[in-house]
Amino acid sequence: PSTDNCTDKERSAFLREALAHLSVDVVASMKKQVEILAEIIDEQPVKDVEKYEAALENITDQTNALDMANLFYQIGGRNVIIPLLRHPLPQIRWRTACIVAECCRNNPFCKNLSVADDMFGPLMEIASNNSDFNGKFKAISAISAIVRDNQEGINQFEKFNGLNMITQALDSANEKIIAKTAYLIIALCDTDHSIIGKLVQTPILESLILLARLSETFLGEHLMRALLSIIRHHDAAAKECLKEELGLYDFIENIISAKSFEDSYEDYVECSREILEILNKVKTSNM
């Protein structure tokens, strides 16, 4: 059921159905973890950080199952998430963001509740904090999970100037952050093609091309896939990629020529071929 239209009776029915598929011990364990976390949302000094970190890790392990993710949101987990995302201790914040990412991955129920509960505000704050690597990484993961196949999530992303956060993340000089940001770009572009026009008006496209040209590791493939997700749905973006000063066309031709016979680069080369095919179509149409 959707968040806004879900009645108390529907929530109760949902919870009964979820409980029917889970053992009493598992449910009791989840409730216990939530109760532990509720102890630290009153902004009092934390005396036993390890206990709360353990509770967060236990919930993360459990919520990678869809039924458990739904149960966590239903039995009080939602009530503790936002205060924990705003907790002064970074290890509490990033572990909480990790839970949101787990719960929302391919899970419309948790995505909708996360948007309705205004989780984007604290997640965007964490994602924009350059001094907290773990928090930034996990918050971007959570945002990616929420926006994929979720238009209202993308609306919230735009409300909080998400493209500015992406621009900043691509400038982070951290491969893991950049790779995770590439996943986010793919999620956005595949879900809502209209955001591509706004993206092209930022430095994001040029940053992706520059980073792709500098990367031949696993990062290079992620960046190329992000580029593909942009130009696949937007001819004007593809035309931008043809600017001679960006050097993308020649770079892609070199990749295909140099890496085609290396098995470890198979996916990278295939993605490059797809990009080249699109660029050639755009070149032909503009002749």
Image (cartoon, rainbow, N blue to C red):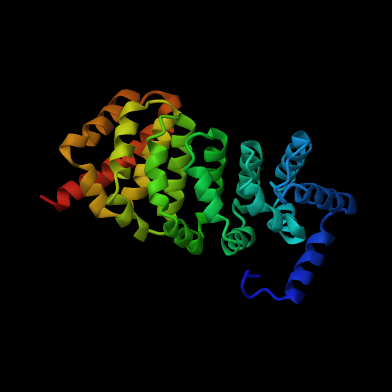
> Residue sitting at 72 percent across and 55 percent down?
77
Q: Quadrant of residue 263?
A: top left
Quadrant for the N terminus in the image: bottom right
Residue drawn where x is 64% and y is 62% of the image: 109
Nearest the eye: 160 or 244? 160
The residue at 71%/76% (across/down) is 7
Whether residue 139 is visible, yes or no, is: yes
The picture places residue 17, in percent across and down from the top left corner, at: 79, 65
Which residue is farthest left? 287
| Left or right side of 56 for 212 | left
Residue 187: give x, y in percent of width and height. Answer: 46, 50
Q: Residue furthest front?
A: 44
* 81 vs 231, nearest the viewer: 81
The residue located at (41%, 59%) in the rendering is 192
Percent x, y for residue 69? Answer: 70, 53
Figure quadrant of residue 138: top right
Point out residue 271 in the picture as x, y percentages from the top left corner. 37, 39
Vertical position of residue 29 compared to residue 14: above or below: above
Instruction: Decide if residue 108 is on the left or right side of residue 21.
Output: left
The answer to whether residue 144 of the structure is visible from this angle is no
Total numbered circles: 0
Q: Is residue 119 left or right of residue 77?
A: left
In this view, 21 is above or below 43: below
* Left or right: residue 27 compared with residue 85: right
